Image (cartoon, helix red, strand yellow):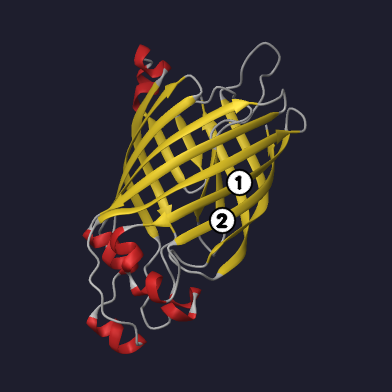
Amino acid sequence: MKSPQRYLAGATLARSSLLLLAYSVTSNAQSQGDEESNWDVSLGAGAIYHPDYPGSDDYEVDAIPLVGINYRDFIQLRGPALSVDFLGLSRSKLAENLSFGALVKYDNGREADDNPVLRNLGDIDSGADGGLFAQYELGPVSFELTALQDLGTRHEGSLAEFQIEYGRMLTARLRAELGVAVSWADDDYTQSYFGISTTQAQASGLREFTAEGGLKDAGVAATVHYLFDEHWRITGRLAYRRLLGDAADSPLVEDEGAQNQGSAAVIVSYGF
């Protein structure tokens, strides 16, 4: 997964362990003299304001640790996700604009004490999801598809997302990105996160609800990066998602939460 500007790469936010958030970057380091470094590493920290569970209308502020590692755009650690670009490793001509490979992503799951509404619903354990990604770059526009499957027995479900992002340099130091995305989840995933079993309904007082798979949500995000010098930058991000289908109809959302989900984040990072 490549970037038109190696020192200002696209960024995404994802939940990680200990109720923190991991900020993911692709490439960040400057060239050393006339020779470009094979390694790009970013470290930083910030904060995010977001719902305390998917579908909640209660918001909280969490700290964001940043760790981003990129080896020649082939192997990348982006926050909680590790990816390997098979086309990049093959050095095929297709790799100039197309990336395709394997992805393993840590998922924080959901804890019953995240919100009083979840208190009698039990935890969804943290663990790893694995799958494939494909990304195509057409000038300043990138198209990306990811498909993930639970690698354990946490929810045993599948999740897929398609995203289109447009990015451009506004000035020599300022880059802006605008992306739209839609995600799909199968029956197992949707039931785990949005369904209410008979036992859970009796314990929680929520109405019983069987959630089926389909479109899960759609949204838009805007990200701005400002580069202070060749190492330091600040990034701001605003995102909005609307839950769809059975995810939106769940008692956790329709009765106790909200279909509209927003977030705002800011982070300062150092690349070397």
Describe the element under mark 1 as helix, strand or loop.
strand
Give me the disc on residue 191. none
Q: In this view, does 126 lie above or below 69?
A: below
- Residue 49: x and y in percent read 61, 60
To which quarter of the image does residue 222 belong? top right
Describe the element under mark 2 as helix, strand or loop.
strand
Residue 123 can be seen in this image:
no
Q: Distance between the residues labelled 1 and 2?
A: 8 Å
Q: What residue type is labelled 2?
A: Ser
Density class for disc 2 (Cα within 10 Å; few <14, some 14-19, many ≥20) is: some
Q: What residue type is labelled 1?
A: Arg
To which quarter of the image does residue 227 belong? top right
Q: Nearer the viewer, residue 261 or 25?
A: 261
Can you say which quadrant of the picture contains the C terminus? top right
At x 22% / y 62%, what residue is drawn? 212
- Residue 41: x and y in percent read 61, 35
Is 138 on the left-hand or right-hand side of 212?
right
Q: Is residue 254 above or below residue 199?
A: above
At x 55% / y 29%, what residue is drawn? 167
Where does label 2 land, which residue? 263
What is the count of numbered marks? 2
At x 26% / y 57%, what residue is drawn? 157
- Residue 95: x and y in percent read 39, 18
Where does label 1 land, which residue? 237
Question: Are the residues at dot 1 and dot 2 in contact (C-beta closer than 8 Å)?
Answer: yes
Residue 85 can be seen in this image:
yes
Is 76 on the left-hand or right-hand side of 104?
right
Is 60 on the left-hand or right-hand side of 231?
left
